[in-house]
Image (cartoon, rainbow, N blue to C red):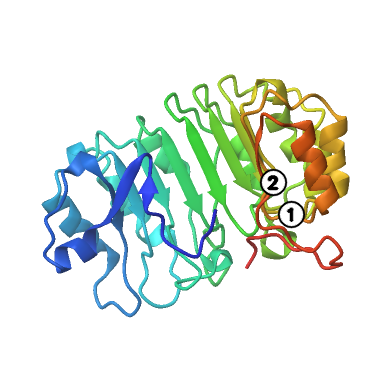
Amino acid sequence: MTINQHIEEFHGLPVTDFRTAVEEGKRLPEAAATAWRIGLDYDEEREFGEVWAKFLETVAPEQVTALVLGPWFSEEPEPLAEVLPAVLAAAPRLTALKALFVGDIIAEECEVSWIQMAEITPVFESFPHLEELVVRGADGDYDGNNPLSLKPVKHEKLKALRFEAGGLPGSVVRAVAACDFPALERLELWLGVDNYGGDWTLEDLGPFLSGANLPSLTYLGLQNAEAQDRIAALAAQAPVVPRLTGLALSLGALTDEGAAALLEGQPLTHLKTLDLHHHYLTEGMQKRLRDALPGVDIDLSDAEDPNDNWRYVAVSE
């Protein structure tokens, strides 16, 4: 997965950039037939609120099932906290919303570590039918206010949750673990590094590896970590793994040590997918993995030099 280009599909739907489509006079698709992207271009004179209001006036909001929020700023990064209330205020009109991507912002527009966020708890509270939520970014404003935050919540419908960050706050990781998500099938955490706010600990990952509070979980991603070897070793013994169909330990600094721990742990042959892309595995270890798991779709793309002493995660700054 890359954050160098805008997503073209979300929640099984093609993405339509609303502002571009209107400006170019294109015929708009039916409201429920696409994932609507709302965002600003660089140096645009309009405010996000203007584009958002135009969207609600133009497209039948009660039929919209998927939304993608692009840049809510046109020059320097601005906090999501300044525009999120307008989105939440429209919740009574967005009664069919099932999927929301907050922050489809690529590196050319703003580095992931500079994306200024907000407390995301009200999203769960405002959209009870939400099935998929993706949040990119975790930073606060220039004074350190309003970073990504979350309070433990209960949500009956959520099936997929992904946090993408160069450094995911430990408070958010712990809050996710404390949430009640009975329907959650897919969870992905891009953990990131301490230099960019990733002050989580291995102990924080325990609830996900046990799976005790996630009865429906079938896909787990604990990714983008310098300590990927240690996470792999924990996953090798994790109680949740036997019921997973997919496991992602990608985007981090995985080496032969972590891969060996996986192979020496509990069986993984039941998995459909094992995502290890962006790794530091030798060719010999890659072959061992393929030979040991012939029926598993293993992603070993984006191989880095295993002899490189400076090992980095795929998404940080």
Residue 69 location in percent, x, y? 36, 55
**Mark 2 sits on what residue?**
276
Residue 118 location in percent, x, y? 48, 55
Please, what secondary structure does the residue beneath circle 1 have?
loop
Left or right of residue 193: residue 77: left
Please, what secondary structure does the residue beneath circle 2 have?
loop
Seen from the viewer's position, the closer of residues 1 and 104 is: 1
Residue 296 location in percent, x, y? 66, 32
The 10 Å Cα crowd at callout 1, few under 14, some 14 to 19, many 20 or more, is: many
| Residue 213 location, quadrant | top right
Seen from the viewer's position, the closer of residues 224 and 54 is: 224
Quarter of the figure that contains the C terminus: bottom right
Q: Are marks 1 and 2 in contact (CB under 8 Å)?
A: yes
Left or right of residue 297: residue 105: left
Q: Residue at x 36, y 30 (%)?
A: 128
Tell me how far mark 1 sits from mark 2, CA to CA.
6 Å
Residue 266 vs 234, above or below: the answer is: above
Residue 302 vs 230, above or below: the answer is: below
The 10 Å Cα crowd at callout 2, few under 14, some 14 to 19, many 20 or more, is: many
Picture mark count: 2
| Residue 45 location, quadrant | bottom left
| Residue 80 location, quadrant | bottom left
* Amino acid type, label 1: His
**Mark 1 sits on what residue?**
279
Report whether residue 111 is seen. yes
Q: Residue at x 44, y 72 (%)?
A: 109
Residue 145 location in percent, x, y? 54, 63
Report whether residue 93 is seen. no
